[in-house]
Image (cartoon, helix red, strand yellow):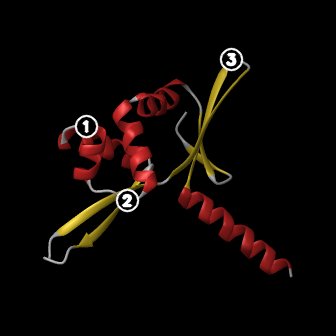
Amino acid sequence: MPASPVGGRMETGGTESSTTLFEVFADDYSREILLAADEQPRTARDLSDICDASLATVYRRISTLRDHGFVEVHSTIGSGGEHRKRFETTLESFHAELSDGELELSVQTRDELADNFSALWETFRDST
């Protein structure tokens, strides 16, 4: 079953989706990138140094993490006119639930939390 947004989070069911997400989180480099980019936005070079990985490895992991919506890119222009990309973690929480022989995963990103807060605020504002 493909991932689908449910109540401000992405829930997945079925073997393929669950397996894919577990593979992402099981990868040491992906976890290190998520943790480092959670502290502050970082360049690929910074992540390469922190993770003790080649730039190619970092870019491959970032690509996978971006595909799942767990990392976003901030582009900036340096004082010398050079373009820089900084990567920041958007993952807020990851939950796994095993019930009645089925595995359900839910992932929440910071964007979804902001959307939830906005929706809550609009509901509150409209009710007053």
Label 1 and label 2: CA atoms lie apart by 18 Å
Judged left or right of residue 103, residue 62 is left
Indicate whether 27 appears above or below 65: above
Q: Nearer the viewer, residue 92 or 18?
A: 92
Closer mark to the observer between disc 1 and disc 2:
1
Mark earlier in primary sequence (2, 3)? 2
Q: Quadrant of the C terminus?
A: bottom right
- Identify residue for label 1: 52
Residue 41's tag is 2
Mark 3: give few (<14), some (14-19) or many (20+) Cα within 10 Å. Answer: few
Q: Position of residue 67 (x, y in %)?
A: 38, 46
* Quadrant of the image occupied by residue 82: bottom left
Place of residue 22 in the rendered image (x, y in percent of width and height, measured from the top left) = 48, 29
Q: Hey, which quadrant is residue 126 in on the image?
A: bottom right
Neighbour class for label 1 at 10 Å: few (<14), some, many (≥20)?
A: few
For badge 3, the amino acid type reads: Gly
The type of residue carrying mark 2 is Pro
Give how far apart the Cα atoms at labels 3 and 1 are: 39 Å
The residue drawn where x is 68% and y is 17% is: 101
From what the image shows, is residue 120 above or below residue 110? below
Q: Residue furthest right?
A: 128
Residue 101: numbered disc: 3
Q: Name the secondary structure under disc 1.
A: loop
Would you place residue 114 above or below residue 5 in this image? below
Q: Residue at x 56, y 27 (%)?
A: 14
As helix, strand or loop, the secondary structure at mark 2 comes to loop
Looking at the picture, how far across and down is residue 4, in whole percent?
Answer: 57, 45
Distance of label 2 from label 3 (alpha carbons): 39 Å
Q: Is residue 121 above or below residue 68?
A: below
Q: Amino acid at mark 1?
A: Asp
In front here: 75 or 38? 38
